[in-house]
Image: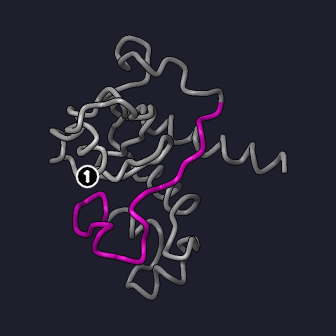
Amino acid sequence: MYAVVKIRGSNHTKVDIKYALRELRLHRVNHLVLIPEDMIGQLKKVKDYVTWGEIDKEHLIKLLKERGKLLGDKPITEEWLKQNGFNSFQEFAEKLLDGKIKLKDYPDIKPVFRMNPPKKGYGKTKEPFKLGGNLGYRGIEINKLIDRMIEGGKIGQAKN
């Protein structure tokens, strides 16, 4: 399973790229979606606007707990998981990663995770990850970006 984050705006882009971003549900910068690995074609099409990589179980659990939302902007809770047949976030994350379930099977869960900008920023947003930028495929390094984005939100909350 890939975690995909939109890191650049999409004004003045080709129609097919806008369509691909819409299909991926990436409407705003700093939005994150989880997609199966068979959608690699869409990712290659929008590689100049997003970054993606394989999310691990630990970070998926953290993402679900801290940024996962139900309809009505309510957080995903242990009670909701138990009502839907899961004992814990760990079990839910394992089944998601194994492909036994999909987020779209649970219409109560919002498919887009609204993230904060990463702590210390993105850096270069016009160069590929391989060349020191932030665009395109980054493999397991996506987990570090997710950590920085979650930390960025905690810093903002501490100031308030």
Q: Colour scheme of this structure image?
A: one colour
Q: Nearer the viewer, residue 34 or 59?
A: 34
Assign a secondary structure to mark 1: helix
| Residue found at the very far front of the displayed protein | 12
Q: Nearer the viewer, residue 26 or 80?
A: 26
Q: At 24% from the left edge and 44% from the top edge, which residue is drawn?
A: 20
* Label 1 Cα crowd, 10 Å radius (few <14 / some 14-19 / many 20+): few
Question: Where 97 sits versus 149, above or below?
Answer: below
Q: Identify the image quadrant of residue 121.
A: top right
Left or right? Give the position of 52 relative to 133.
left
Q: Identify the image quadrant of residue 55.
A: top left
Left or right? Give the position of 110 relative to 18.
right
Left or right? Give the position of 35 relative to 88.
left
Residue 114 in the image: x percent, y percent?
52, 53
Q: At 55% from the left edge and 76% from the top edge, which residue is drawn?
A: 72
Circle 1 is placed at which residue position? Answer: 23
Question: Where 98 sits versus 51, above or below?
Answer: below
Please say whether residue 37 is one of the residues in the magenta stretch.
no
- Residue range (magenta): 96-119
Question: Where 10 sits versus 81, above or below?
Answer: above
Residue 45 in the image: x percent, y percent?
21, 33
Q: How many marks?
A: 1
Please say whether residue 114 is one of the residues in the magenta stretch.
yes
Q: At 36% from the left edge and 43% from the top edge, which residue is drawn?
A: 4
Residue 42 in the image: x percent, y percent?
20, 41
| Residue found at the very far bottom of the displayed protein | 83
Q: At 38% from the left edge and 25% from the top edge, which residue is drawn?
A: 135
| Residue found at the very far top of the displayed protein | 131
Three-letter code, disc 1 = Glu
Residue 99 in the image: x percent, y percent?
22, 62
Per the picture, the main secondary structure of the magenta-coloured stretch is loop
